[in-house]
Amino acid sequence: MSELSVESHEREGVVLLYPSGFINAHTVRLFEGALQKALDGGCYQIVVSGVGLRYVASAGLGALMGVIEEVRTNGGDIRLAELNETVRNIFEMLGFNHLYRIFPSEQEAVLSFREASGRGRAPA
Amino acid sequence: MTEKRRRPQPDVLLRVPSGTEFLAAIRDTTKRVAELAGLDAATAEQVALAVDEASTNVIEHAYGGARDRFVDLAFTCEPDALLVEIVDDGRPVDRSAVPRVDLRRYARERRRGGFGMHLMGRIMDRVSFRRRGRSNVCCMVKKLPAAEGREAR
């Protein structure tokens, strides 16, 4: 069984990525590829759903950091949703919760792109 | 396991080839050993992450991606702490300075690396590096809950 799969869907102009499994140095290329595919398609509003994400190592955090400037320069953002406690702790340990908005649900993350003020945790 | 008072001894030895596909085995083994040592599941998961990061550094930096080498891990459950040694015979890498992570600068510079060492330092109670003969040795220590309770008193 593969350690990681990444499904991608589009809803209301927002690309939803569903990494399922583990993101580490071995699997990160697949996650980077999914992010890059969205950017190549001109989609800069991205929600990464952690509903199937069991674990993320620094390689996965690096993948997000590597593209966030390009995404925001183009008026978009990468928002996170439904992170389990393990993954959320890792994000908070590095202060990623100050750089990325994290939402309890995928729906709230998608809607935040349509609303002036989302209800997720705002970056500092 | 936490009641042992005899001399410390490696409880688990693990040798894996220097390919990232073996990181899952390292993570799974570390998590199980950490739980057996007395850490709760969430903390054991974090310790597994720290060991994953240290092993990734070995594969990517000390071995420069070479896949024909080995990463040796030794887990020792002491009465008050879990010790993990990660040993390689790759090129010496200076890890004396743990970089301070400036996320906004990293984002501007589109940096994808530099977080692993920081995570190791945040998760473990002690992280140290030394040369032993021709080997690099990364030693990480995680205190067990009972030891932390004793210190608090």
Image (cartoon, rainbow, N blue to C red):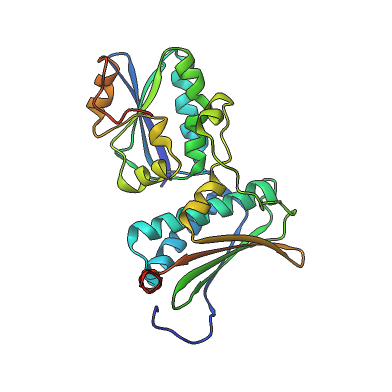
User: Residue drawn 66% across and 50% down?
Assistant: B67
Q: Position of residue A22 (x, y in %)?
A: 42, 45
Q: How many numbered markers are drawn?
A: 0
Q: Position of residue A67 (x, y in %)?
A: 50, 24
Where on the picture, by quarter, is residue B150?
Answer: bottom left
| B8 left or right, relative to B129 | left
Q: Position of residue A5 (x, y in %)?
A: 40, 37
Look at the image and tell me in which quarter the C terminus of chain A lies: top left
Where on the picture, by quarter, is residue A44?
Answer: top left
Q: Position of residue A73 (x, y in %)?
A: 48, 14
Closer-to-camera residue (A21/A47): A47
**Residue B82 in the image: above or below residue A80:** below
User: Residue drawn 40% across and 41% down?
Assistant: A91
Closer-to-camera residue (A31/B43): B43
**Residue B114 in the image: above or below residue A46:** below
| B117 left or right, relative to A86 | right
User: Residue drawn 67% across and 47% down?
Assistant: B61
| A49 left or right, relative to A29 | left
Closer-to-camera residue (B118/A22): B118
